[in-house]
Image (cartoon, rainbow, N blue to C red):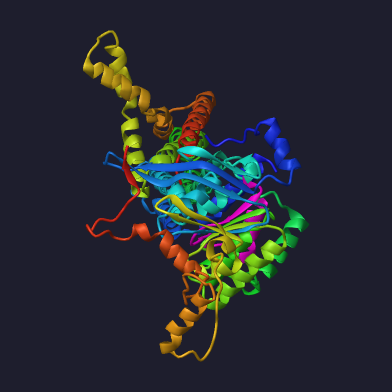
Amino acid sequence: MSSLSRIYLIARNTLTEAMRQRVLNILLLFALVAIASAFLFDDLTLEADAFKFIKDFSLGAMSVFGLLIALMSTAALLPTELENRTVYTILAKPVHRAEFLLGKFLGVLVLLAVALFLMSVVFFVVLFLKEQWVIGPMEEHLAQMASSGASPEALAHQSRLIEQAYAAARDPDIFQALLLIYAKLAFTASIAMVISTFATSTIFTVATTFMIYLIGHLQSTARETWQAQADEFSLASIGLGVLVLLLPDMNTYSLIDEILAGTEVLWADTLQILALTVVRIAVYLGVAVIIFQDREL
Amino acid sequence: METSSPPPQSEAADASGSASTPAVEIRGLTKKYRLPWKNRVLIAVNALDLTVERGEVFGLLGPNGSGKSTTMKMLLGLVRPTSGTARIFGLEAESMAARARMGLLPENPYFYKFLNGDETLRYFGKLCGLRGAALEKRVNELIKLVNLENGRDRPLGAYSKGMLQRIGLAQAMVHDPELLLLDEPTAGVDPIGSREIRDLIVRLREMGKTVIFCSHLLEQVQEVSDRVAIMSLGNKMVEGSLDELLVQQDTAQLAFDGLPPEKREEARAALERLGATNVRLERPRLSLEQLFLKAVEHERERPDGQRPTNEAKE
């Protein structure tokens, strides 16, 4: 019986448990409805803007709801087990604490992937319907213009508009953005995992992780300030240094915003961030395991 | 650190080879909890020595907060001792190998409410490495053993207290461990269910298992235990076989009917004439309850209104 199969078992159990939690289901339902509602906003003048709006809105909703799901499901992992004392029965079996923790976390990772997948499906359906809705009439209009003998310039202009709309609707970079959102959520979940290994309540974990998440977006600013005054030896610079060391840099994932702004992004950059995320999560989980090993149950 | 590092060679050989290694060997086991915001510690378990032989049914008794559960948790590596050692069949208590040989029924067990009886046993069975036909066979055996046919496809959220205890017993036995730790196996169970659990413990002994159990139902403990220990405020007050502890040696019991109360003194005088000394007319065998109350007597409120505690200066 290998460690891996025990981790797999615990992960699957965690996933089943999470799926049957009403709060998470409702949260996911809200997210799906929110993303679907993006279809209804269409008083935007430029057709290409309609797609940008849908992408902005949907990916924003995915980030926010994903963050809520990540925080709540991860923070509840250990307290639920401890309060219900199910942890005793599991750890009384020949199961390592590390296996237990990793299995639980893996369950959350799969849960996040499922949630993000469902949200993406709704998102792509909305995008596809919008495409039919907006570009269909544009192409009809073009055909009409061609048959009614419009000027070549006017025709070219209309085709360019259609091209732009297509480009906005079918931006392949969106997949990179989705992967990055997932990476960001998984990383945030790993922070919550560390905190929940010593926290005494779910709410503490949620609140603290959320704070770290927010401040983490300022980490790069703090780092730059610190680097600028590195040779200066003051209380402020030491404090800043400690902050830079302790806080995770959430700005790594700002590539998502660039993709949404329409900047072309290289896969190489995205893959690099994904690799960095894997390393970060591994380090955080390592810390979580070390703390959990010594915890009194 | 919780480790799976193999025990030293000699002990490993001892554990697997010799059948004379005790099931549980506790030496100087101590657990202190630091009390937050106070410069004091709570001594939950104080230098406990305890040996439980293989095949014994051992009753661990004591009032609430006497350190029984903490002791059990230390045996399973759920709580790390401050000092002292605990060995299970010669293996370090915190090792995976030791846990593979024992099963725990925790106090007030709760399981995943969304699983039914079969799923629960399958989950725990798989965690212990059982698969396929062997797993199904074991699940069927256990369901039968604890008499839980009606709970097979019912979610545990809809179980009664007695059914929860029984599924708890079943999961503790899923990997057929040699040692069972039962924390309050009959708490909150009706008399019939309680009787069934008692019978199950007897059956476990017949199967050659070692059982350590905590209970407040002293009568039941008296019925099934070979030996008992009574703990109070973290200290072991009494340990021994029930015969050693309860039978007052050198004392005979006279039973008779029809002696009028006013003739009692006469009877006593007659016995003393025959050479008997210190004649008493009470029952010579203590009940376990009497012994228990005597052992934990010092916990009661003292005349100065203070209760003794197991808190101490650091």
As drawn, which residue projects farthest toward the front? B273
Residue A26 occupies quadrant? bottom left
Q: Give above or below for A258 relative to B110.
A: above
Residue B117 occupies quadrant? bottom right
Residue B6 occupies quadrant? top right
Residue at point 52% right, 63% down?
A: B113
Which region is colored magenta?
B99-126
Look at the image and tell me whether residue B2 can be seen: yes
- Most foreground residue, A239 or B174: B174
Quarter holding the C terminus of chain B? top left
- Most foreground residue, A217 or A246: A246
Residue at point 59% right, 67% down?
A: B166
Rendered location of residue B13, percent (x, y)? 73, 36
Q: Please say whether residue B113 is one of the residues in the magenta stretch.
A: yes
- Most foreground residue, B293 or B115: B293
Look at the image and tell me whether residue A73 can be seen: no
Left/right of residue B187 with respect to residue B168 in the rendered view:
left
- Most foreground residue, B257 or A68: B257
As drawn, which residue projects farthest toward the top? A231
Rendered location of residue A169, percent (x, y)? 48, 41
Q: Please say whether residue B118 is one of the residues in the magenta stretch.
A: yes
Residue at point 45% right, 63% down?
A: B292
